[in-house]
Image (cartoon, grey):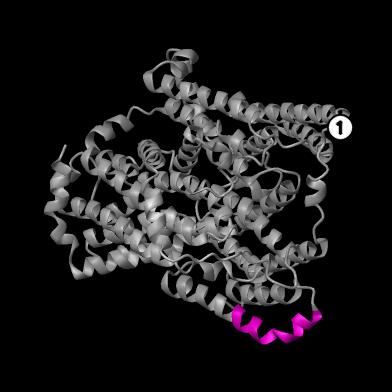
Amino acid sequence: MFDGLIGVVSHLGNLFTLYNMTILVLGVIGGIILGALPGVSPTLAVALLVPFTFYMEPASGLILLGSVYTSSVAGGAISAILINVPGAPANIATLLDGYPMARSGRAEEALYTCFISSFIGGLFGMVIMILLTLPLAEFALKFRSTEIFWVAILGLTVVAGLGTGNMIKALISGAFGIWLSTIGSNPITGEFRFVFHDILMGGINIIPALIGLFAIPQAFSLAESYGAQRTAFKIQREKGLFGKTFIKVIKMFRVQTVGSIVGSIVGIIPGVGGQVSGIVAYDQVKKISKHPDKFGTGIPDGVAAAESANNAMVGPSLIPLLTLSVPGSPTAAVLLGGLLIHGIFPGPDLFRLHPAIVHTFIGSLVMAQIGMFFFGTIIARYSNWVVRVPDIYMSVSIIILATFGTYCVSNNFQDVIVMFGIGLIMYLGDKFGFSALPVVMGVILGVIAENNFLKAYLIAGAGDGFFAQFFTGGINVIVILLSLFSVAYGIYSGMKGKKAQPQRSDIIVSVITFVVGISLLCSLDVEDPLSSIFPDATLLVMVFLSGLLFIMTIMAIKKKKVSTRGAEGRLAFSRTRVMITMVLAVVYLSLLDISGFYFTSALFFFAFASIIALDKQYFFDHIRSRVVTSVCFVAVLYVIFNVVLKVQTPTGFLF
C-alpha cells in the first residue's frame, strides 16, 4: 500500500531541480490562465502544450503536461465566478454559487474558496492515487457499459434541481439538452439524425454547446443592460479575508469530504469525467445541508463542493491510464499521447520499467496542487480588476473569446456557427424562465448515456437478456438506488421549497415546445430501431412535459395564481442594443474567414464598444481609448496564442 508513497519520496530529487521546477511553475501559471479562458478545457490546454515536450526529457515533458492539467481544472472556475461563463465543463457547478457571490461583491472570497477547496480535493485525490493505485485500477475495470449508463442517469437525476424554480421547465431544458446530444450520427449504427443542414453533420460537440449556452446569453445580457454608467459590482474589500476564508473552508469538513470522495470515485470511472463529479458533489452536499434553500444564492459551500470534487478527480482519472493503458478521460488520452511520444507505454509494467519517470510525474502532480493554490490565491486578490471592467468591454470580449475558444477546439468554423445559434436560443429561453444548466447537463450526459445504453443493449441481446444486464450486479444496484433516492429527494424538495408561479407566457412556451417536439418526432427517419430509441424517448418526454406545463398554467390562471412578473418583465429589454449586438456579431463571424481573426476581432471590438452605448457624446469623446483598448486586447491574444502557443485561428488576407 505504501510502495507508491515510498517511490514518490525516493525520486523527489529528480523533481527538485531548477529546470524541472521552472517548468512546473510555468505550467501551473499557464494552466490557470488557459483554464480561465472560455472553451479552453483542460484537454485542449494540455494538447496545446504537447508539441513543447518533443525535445524535453520524458520526465520534464510529463511535468509540464501534468501541471497544466492540474491547474487548468481550477483555472476554469475563474471565468465561472467572475463572468458566469465556465472555463470548462468541469466548472459548471461552480458558477451556481460563485457568480452570485461575485455579484454581491464577494468575488475575492469566492476565488479564495475555490482555490483552497481545489487544493484540499486535489491533495485528497493525489493521496488516493499514490496509496491505492492498483486496487482502484481493478475496481475501474468493473465499470462496464451498464454501470456507466446508470452513472450517467444518476447525473441526469439532478437536472430537476438545476432550474430557476420551475421543475417542469428544468426537466424540459434537460430533455432539450439530451435531444441536442442525439444530433448527428448514432454512435453505434452510424445513421444520421436531425441533420437539417450540413453544419450539423458532426453533431453538437460539448465545448461549442457549453460556450454557446453560457457565454453568448451573458454577452447579450451585458449589452442590453448597459447604461450611461457601469452596472458595477460592489467591491467589498476586507482585511485578512484570506485567513478568514481559509478557516471557514477548513471548517466545511462535511462539504470537503463529500466533494473529495465523489470526485475520486467518479474520476476513476473511465469516460465519465470532471463535469459529472462537480455537479453530483454539489447535489449531494445540497441534500445533506441544513439550509439547501440557500444553494444557488451565493453560498461558499456550493463553490467548495464543486471545486473539491473537480480537483479530487484529477489523480484518480490517471490511474486507469498508468496501470491499464486505459485513458479514463479525454485529458488522460492526450497524456497517453505525451507518454507514447517518448516511447513510454503505460500498463502493468510501467512502474517496474520506468519507476523514476512515473514517480517523478506523480510527485509533480502533488507539487502542482501546491503551486495552483499559491498562484491561485494571488490571482484572487486582483479579481476586482475583472469585475470593474465596463459591461461594454466585457460583452465584446466574451464574444471574441467564445469564438476563439470554439474554433481552436477542432479548427472548424461550423462549430462557431453552431455555438452562436445555440447561444441565441438559450438567450431567448432565459427570458421565459429556462436555465442553461439542465441543457448542458443533458448535452454532456446524453452522449454518455446513449452510447453505453446501446452497447449494453446489444450485449444483453446476445447474452443473458435485458433485465440481467441492466438490473443485476452490485454496482448497478447501488447506482440505481442512488438514482431513485435522488429523484425522490428532488420531488420532495421541489414540493417543500419555494415554487415559481406559472406565467401567462408559459401557455405560448408550452404550445411551441409541444409542436416542436411532435415535429421532430415526425422528422426522424432512420432504418435501424437502435438509432431512434433515445431520440424518441427524449422527445416524448419533452412533449409530455410541455403538455403538463400547459395544463398547470391553465389551472393556475383559473385560480388566479399566475405571476405578473415573469417573462413579461424579463422581456422588457433594450431591443435596439440586442439587435445591434446580433448584427455586429453576424458581421464579425462573416468577416473572420475573409480578413482574419485578429484584425477582424480588433475591428469588431472597436465597433461594438463605439455603437452599443447609443450615446453620440460617448462615441466622439472616447475614440482614442477604445482604439487603444481594442488593439491591446487583440495584441495580447496574438502574442499568447499565435506567437507562443501557435494556435490556429481563422485566416484571411490580413491576420
Image quadrant in which the N terminus is located? top left
The percent coordinates of residue 343 (x first, y second) are 23, 53
* Residue located at (79% from left, 63% from top): 579
Q: Say what amino acid the circle numbered 1 marks.
A: Lys
Residue 496 point in image, percent of width and height: 63, 28
Q: Residue furthest front?
A: 239
Above or below residue 388? Residue 249 is above
Q: Secondary structure at mark 1?
A: loop
Q: Residue furthest right?
A: 558
Looking at the rendering, which quadrant does residue 573 occupy? bottom right
Q: On screen, 316 above or below 85?
A: above
Left or right: residue 142 versus residue 238 is left
Query: According to the image, label 1 marks what residue?
Result: 560
627 magenta-colored: yes
- Above or below, 396 relative to 117: below
Residue 273 occupies which quadrant of the picture?
Answer: top left
Q: Is residue 570 magenta?
A: no
Other-residue count near label 1 (Cα within 10 Å), few / some / many at <14 / 14–19 / ≥20: few
Q: Residue at x 70, y 26 (%)?
A: 540
Residue sitting nearer the eye, 570 or 524: 570
- Residue 539 in which image quadrant: top right
**What is the magenta range?**
616-630
State the residue in front, 76 or 538.
76
Q: Residue at x 44, y 13 (%)?
A: 468
Residue 583, percent from left and from top = 76, 65
Magenta span main SS: helix
